[in-house]
Image (spheres, rainbow, N blue to C red):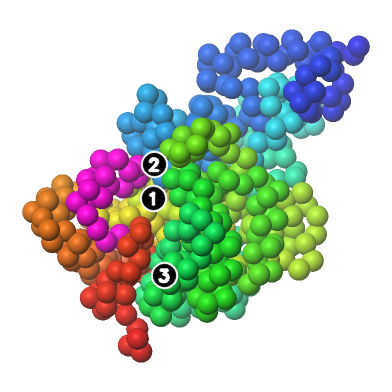
Amino acid sequence: MPLFTPGHRKQHKFYPLMPQPFGYRVLEQIERWIKGPLFGCRMCGNCLLQETAFICPMVCPKGLRNGPCGGSTPERCYVDERYPCVWYEIFKRSFAMGREHKLLEVLPPVDWGQMGSETWYGVWKSVRAVGVRRFVGGMASRDAATRARVWDSVFRPIRQPDWWGGDDQPHPPAYTEPVSELERRLKAGEFVVATEIAPPLSTATGKLIERIEQVKPYVAAINFTDNPSATPRMSSLACSKIALEHGAEPVLQMTARDRTRTGLQSEVIGASALGVRNMLVIAGDHSRLGPSPMSRADILDVDAVQMLWILRKMRDEKKYLDGRALKEPPQFFLGAAASPFASAPHFQALREEKKVNAGAQFFQTNLIFDTDHFEVWLNALARRNLLGRVYILAGITPLKTLKMARHLHTKVPGVVLPERILKRMEAAGDGAQQEGLAIAVELIAAIRKLQGLNGVHIMAVGWEEIVPTLLQEAGLAPAAV
Ligand code: SF4
């Protein structure tokens, strides 16, 4: 058997009984022994240590490859509190090393065919393609830019295979006329209101339709959440179709947790054919938080940044992920979630920039109860020149009960409910609902004064009937209603 066979490296882990050439096995073991202790390497075979300040991100319970999730904090991972958030550590070290620009590169989904295999032979082939002399000469150069260029010419093909072709640059949409009412109103400069409805837990659609009819006159669009808290419900796509039939404009939500790269592309084409014109992608709550035994969502096939990248390419470059031409591409206004209270504002701002570069045209934020901190996040976005490049809708939730306020105060990752709001809810006693409504009205008034805001996204969490009253009291109800 030859020591190395071109192409043999691919897919061997899925055929574990096939004999592996001796040279690969030796290299694999050496790489494992060296990179494991040094970098926490998990031998994914898709090495991206160059972009992650030499910390392996494969320990992230969500398998994210493009930055922290909305629940990350400086102290801990929200999924497994025994450990720090690996992405917080990566961002911290990247900023300390002056390598934060590396974090903007959109990194591809894992090629699972490479899982467990070595990468050093690929690096060697890359060095030979560049030319051994040129590589050694470049790396010996006194000019840092030359060193960086030569280094990159070797490692770029390893982390950015041809089938992906990602980069770190913005890509404005390839169309000019708005494709949805939500986009039209935002482009027209209106202060826009959207809301969301959690899909039913059964096939009964009566309550869903009632809620759609209730909120429809007041909002530009209605999001239908996608199995929130990793709990199965009617699909967001089915609810979106029902909304269209009742004259409302839907926002189809898609979590990375419940998608493969193939399923994602297929669903988006189907949704567009059905007339859905707004799509929002999020990573989704980890399956450990749901009621069923934990699924394989511990490793996502694609993350939210990759989803944005894939969808933008389908729409604007008329290509499937595999490069096949897409003759009649889907049309949509593409959104993402933003988490102003996760990790640190300047880390999150970099993460939001990556999402905008990948294709996000609008953000709907996590719940806002602390407008001062929210402004800090907006300022961090302004420093990265993001305001005006992406529409931002601030997430507002009217508190229905004291129990809900207590839950949000202590238990929900990425949400900061300040002590003063909790105290107001406690003092309200039987008038908790009225107090919760008053707090939401005050928050909207404060948020409207902030720079770079384009609207609000009301997340009433099972209290959708309050949306019309809230918008009337906040002065956001249309005159005609
Ligand atoms: S907090 Fe989120 S990004 Fe950080 S390690 Fe945990 S799951 Fe991954």
476 on left or right of 358: left
| Residue 229: % across, % down | 44, 45
Q: Gap in Å between the C-alphas at discs 2 and 1?
A: 8 Å
Q: Gap in Å between the C-alphas at discs 1 and 3?
A: 27 Å
Ligand 1 within 8 Å of the CB at mark 2: yes
Residue 405 within the magenta-colored segment of the rendering: yes
Which residue lies under the disc numbered 3? 211
Amino acid bearing label 3:
Arg
Callout 2 secondary element = loop
In the image, the segment drawn in magenta is 394-416
Name above or below for residue 452 compared with residue 257. below
Callout 1 secondary element = loop
365 on left or right of 127: left
133 on left or right of 53: right
Front residue of 477/94: it is 477
Amino acid bearing label 1:
Ser
Name above or below for residue 433 compared with residue 8. below
Name above or below for residue 146 compared with residue 216. above
Which residue lies under the disc numbered 2? 71
Which residue lies under the disc numbered 1? 339
